[in-house]
């Protein structure tokens, strides 16, 4: 049929449901439907990345009978694709008249006017949305293979991936669910950091590998049971090279997305201790063997190995750190964590400036515990793509609990602290049992 009208539908379709089908059916009645499928990058610019990556989403959409063609929509704004296609119609559910997408909508109307195109807004299908389905998925849990690849996908679709320390299921759930709106954009944490420091402290042990990997993995599994976001595992120096394949197998089986190993040897001491006397760094070539071992024993290349350089911690300089970064990158590391216990990010920024010019450059990770004044935007500007807030939830919980305990002792009753803590009803309803 000649002269069929051109219809454009922008979709992200994380999880396809009958609401989407309804829109596409209406669009198809109007003419030939081109779907502008939002890329992971476009979606990441205003909310969390979808469960399925672009390629998989495309396969689904292009096989729907109402769809003629699928093209990428690289931005939240429809304008570039509309100018390209000049459709007669754009079809979108009427739910975008308010909220985050209001501006996107008015830009669509303005652009369509240029060639007298029309915006058609079918009534939004009630009681069904990707968010409702996503919450259902959270209740069921997520498959390890889906979770493992999520960190890599986040790294390729976001300017900076934001990870927060988690030491049990409750902290995992905070990271999973907490979302705020800043300038009409959803802001949330992208994943969890299983910290050796806070996992050990929670169990009353020092951060010196007193907690063995079985205990660490048991904590990790608790978090995995109740969350779907990716997890980065702090493995100290990884232990004996011969044991690494078994650790990797456990981590992948649990759905962890990355292991971070640090280039130290001997009795483990936390890197933030002032006194680092006796702390020894591994020989770079020996440490590189551990990286290679992880690469050869992982089942999926999506499982990332991140090499943590401790040169600044042990008082060695920039050149040592850079030399190691080259060696670790060539050995197969997927990213470099350059650690520092300075009050400012000066030394890690100097490192990044140099390493960025290397042909062996790989993504950079920052742990701003001592230089906590740094803003994410400055980390981005200096070439960092992952930030780990490594211990804040435990540091927040401990004084709050101590305060409650102290108040009961002081007042000889619990009434005074009751008003400052969450109610029993809330704690019962925090975890649903249905
Ligand atoms: C951890 O959180 O356990 C870390 C980061 O490894 S640091 O405490 O800075 O060593
Ligand atoms: Mg640690």
Image: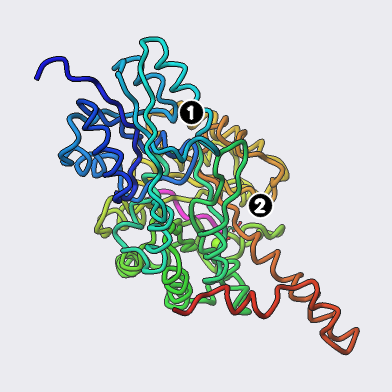
Q: Residues within 10 Å of mark 2 (few under 14, many from 20)?
A: some
Q: Is residue 53 left or right of residue 224?
A: left
Q: Is residue 281 magenta?
A: yes
- Residue 230, numbered circle: none
Q: Is residue 125 left or right of residue 30?
A: right
Q: CA distance from mark 2 to mark 1?
A: 38 Å
Quarter of the figure that contains the N terminus: top left
Numbered disc 1: secondary structure: helix
Foreground residue, 231 or 363?
231
- Identify the residue under disc 1: 104
- Identify the residue under disc 2: 369
Q: Residues within 10 Å of mark 1 (few under 14, many from 20)?
A: some
Residue at the image point whose x is 63% and y is 79% from the top: 204
Instruction: Find residue 125 and report its horizontal and vertical position in percent.
Output: 38, 48
Q: Nearer the viewer, mark 2 or mark 1?
A: 1
Query: Where is ligand 2, by quadrant?
Result: bottom right
Residue at the image point whose x is 33% and y is 44% from the top: 13
**Ligand 1: does it lie within 8 Å of the C-beta at label 2?**
yes
Determine whether label 2 and label 1 are within 8 Å by CB: no
Instruction: Name, please, the residue furthest toward the top.
Output: 114
Numbered disc 2: secondary structure: loop
Residue 327 in view (yes/no): no
**Region rendered in magenta:** 280-285
Quarter of the figure that contains the C terminus: bottom left
Foreground residue, 302 or 102?
102
**Ligand 1: does it lie within 8 Å of the C-beta at label 1?**
no
Instruction: Find residue 329 and report its horizontal and vertical position in percent.
Output: 38, 41
Q: Is residue 339 magenta?
A: no
Instruction: Name, please, the residue furthest toward the right.
Output: 411
Instruction: Find residue 116 and report its horizontal and vertical position in percent.
Output: 37, 12
């Amino acid at each position: 049929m000649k002269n069929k009208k051109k219809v454009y539908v922008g979709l992200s379709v994380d999880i396809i449901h009958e609401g989407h089908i309804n829109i596409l059916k209406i669009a198809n009645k109007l003419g030939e439907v081109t779907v502008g499928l939002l890329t992971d990058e476009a979606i990441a610019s205003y909310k969390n990345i979808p469960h399925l990556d672009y390629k998989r989403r495309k396969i689904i959409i292009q096989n729907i009978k109402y769809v003629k063609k699928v093209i990428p929509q690289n931005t939240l704004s429809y304008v570039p694709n509309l100018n390209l296609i000049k459709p007669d119609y754009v079809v979108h559910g009427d739910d975008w008249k308010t909220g985050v997408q209001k501006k996107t909508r008015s830009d669509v109307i303005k652009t369509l006017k240029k060639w007298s195109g029309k915006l058609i807004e079918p009534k939004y299908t009630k009681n069904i949305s990707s968010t409702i389905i996503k919450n259902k998925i959270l209740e069921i849990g997520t498959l390890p293979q889906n979770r493992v690849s999520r960190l890599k996908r986040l790294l390729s679709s976001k300017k900076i991936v934001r990870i927060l320390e988690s030491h049990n299921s409750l902290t995992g759930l905070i990271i999973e669910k907490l979302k705020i709106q800043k300038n009409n954009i959803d802001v949330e944490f992208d994943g969890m950091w299983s910290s050796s420091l806070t996992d050990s402290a929670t169990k009353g042990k020092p951060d010196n590998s007193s907690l063995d990997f079985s205990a660490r993995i048991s904590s990790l599994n608790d978090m995995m049971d109740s969350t779907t976001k990716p997890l980065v595992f702090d493995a100290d120096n990884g232990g004996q090279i011969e044991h690494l394949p078994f650790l990797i197998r456990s981590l992948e089986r649990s759905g962890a997305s990355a292991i971070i190993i640090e280039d130290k040897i001997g009795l483990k001491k936390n890197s933030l201790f002032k006194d680092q006397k006796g702390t020894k760094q591994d020989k770079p070539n020996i440490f590189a063997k551990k990286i290679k071992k992880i690469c050869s024993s992982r089942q999926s290349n999506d499982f990332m190995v991140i090499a943590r350089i401790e040169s600044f911690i042990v008082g060695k300089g920039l050149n040592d750190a850079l030399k190691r970064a080259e060696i670790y990158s060539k050995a197969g590391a997927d990213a470099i964590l350059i650690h520092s216990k300075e009050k400012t990010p000066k030394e890690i920024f100097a490192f990044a400036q140099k390493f960025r010019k290397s042909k062996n450059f790989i993504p950079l990770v920052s742990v701003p515990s001592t230089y906590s004044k740094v803003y994410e935007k400055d980390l981005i500007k200096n070439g960092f793509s992952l930030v780990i807030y490594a211990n804040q939830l435990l540091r927040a919980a401990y004084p709050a609990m101590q305060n409650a305990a102290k108040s009961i002792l002081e007042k000889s009753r619990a009434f005074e602290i009751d008003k400052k803590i969450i109610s029993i009803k809330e704690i019962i309803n925090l975890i649903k049992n249905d």
